[in-house]
Amino acid sequence: MDVVFRALADPTRRRMLELLDEGPATISQLAEPFDVSLTSITQHVRVLERSQLISTTKQGRSRICSLDRRSIERARSWLDDRRSRWERRVDRLAEHLDAHPDPGDPR
């Protein structure tokens, strides 16, 4: 999970994932919206590949990148689990505060 969140921490890589959400793209196509070298984009692609957020396949002279939703789903599931735990804690706190009102509270 750490490698996924490290990959997602970079705004360029997040934007690349947004582009790939629209469909597969070559590395050159991914590079178009960015004012960085193709070498830099290739390094970002490697990070995304290692984190299993994307997969790549060779097609002729091009490398096609595709989104791999499984890692995104695992990250979402982990975050959802944390959110649900915190919501339960906040609900318990609210119940406790309702059961033990502050005597100085004008409610």
Image (spheres, grey):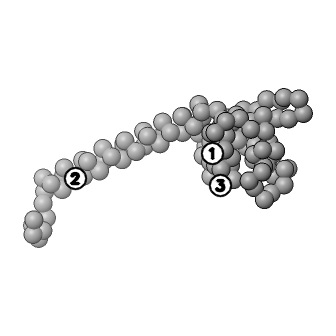
Apparent side of residue 58 relative to residue 72 in the rendered image (left or right): right
Q: Nearer the viewer, residue 22 or 73?
A: 22
Mark closer to the chain start, 1 or 2 = 1
Residue 82, image quadrant: top left
* Number of the label disc, if any, that sits on residue 94: 2
Q: Which mark is residue 18?
A: 1
Q: CA distance from mark 2 to mark 3?
A: 37 Å
User: Which amino acid, by three-letter code, is at mark 1?
Assistant: Glu
Q: Nearer the viewer, mark 1 or mark 3?
A: 1
Helix, strand or loop under label 2: helix
- Which part of the image, by quadrant, shows the N terminus? top right
Question: Percent from the top left, x then y, of residue 66?
Answer: 70, 34
- What type is the residue that disc 2 sits on? Ala
Instruction: Give above or below for 100 relative to 29.
Output: below
Left or right: where 80 falls relative to 6: left
Q: Position of residue 100 (x, y in %)?
A: 13, 57
Q: Nearer the viewer, mark 1 or mark 2?
A: 1
Residue beneath disc 3: 11
Q: Is residue 69 above or below residue 13?
A: above
Disc marking residue 70: none
Give the residue displayed 43% in from the left and 40% down from the top. 80
Instruction: Find the residue positioned furthest to the right.
Output: 61
